[in-house]
Image: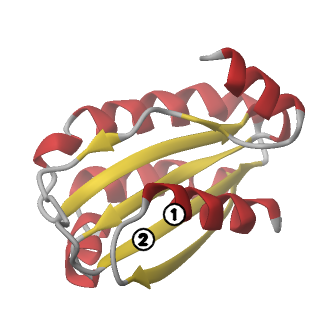
Amino acid sequence: MTALNHVSTALGQPVVSGWMPGPVNPAGRPVVVSVTDFASQQRRALPGIAYRGMRMREGWYAMPGAVGLWLWSLPVAGRSGSISVWESAEALQQFIVLPRHLSIMDRYRDRGDVRSTTWEADVFDSGETLHRAYAWIGER
């Protein structure tokens, strides 16, 4: 974690992982962005959630339809999630129904509250994506 992330956490901004690129280069084409937010009711679930999220991130370079991914966390608030970028809504849907993803969701679904948002962008701009995601995360 960088010093900037320490300051961000103190100010209530998410701690964000480095960008993990997927196999798709959006090259000026439209993308779909998905942001998830899991608010844990049980603090003891947080290490397992973080571990499984990082394990899934390891294979992101080969995730069909993925442009890339950031993981984020607000540790003091017991919240974490992802900011993922996709070449299409269909690619996002294919990820959502992957057995490994469904297994993680099933394991933690009753241990907190999940919310998500999705939007389309004409082109991928990492700064704008993060800005909009942070604003949405801050709404909770």
Look at mark 2 in the image and give the residue it sits on. 33
Amino acid type of the residue that numbered disc 2 sits on in the rendered structure: Val
Seen as rendered, the residue at the extreme front is 28
- What amino acid is labelled 1 in the image? Thr
Residue 18 in the image: above or below residue 85: above
Task: Identify which residue is drawn at 79% across, 47% down.
Answer: 41
* SS label for mark 2: strand
Residue 112 point in image, percent of width and height: 70, 54
Between 39 and 62, which is closer to the camera in this rendering? 62
Instruction: Give the image location of residue 98, x and y in percent.
Output: 22, 61
Tell me which corner region of the image, top left, top right, bottom left or bottom right, holds residue 114. Answer: bottom right
Q: How dense is the environment of label 2, judged by Cα within 10 Å: few (below 14), some, or many (20 and up)?
A: many
The residue located at (63%, 60%) in the rendering is 131
Q: Nearer the viewer, residue 57 or 96?
A: 57
Q: Which residue is mark 1?
A: 129
Circle 1 packing at 10 Å, graded few (<14), some (14-19), many (20+), is some
Determine whether label 2 and label 1 are within 8 Å by CB: yes
Residue drawn at x 21%, y 72% as measured from the top left: 94
Q: Nearer the viewer, mark 2 or mark 1?
A: 1
Give residue 87's position: percent from left, percent from top: 21, 72
Image quarter where the C terminus lies is bottom right
Is residue 74 found left or right of 54 in the rendered image?
right
N-terminal of the two: label 2 or label 1? 2
| Lateral position of residue 77 relative to residue 93, left or right | right
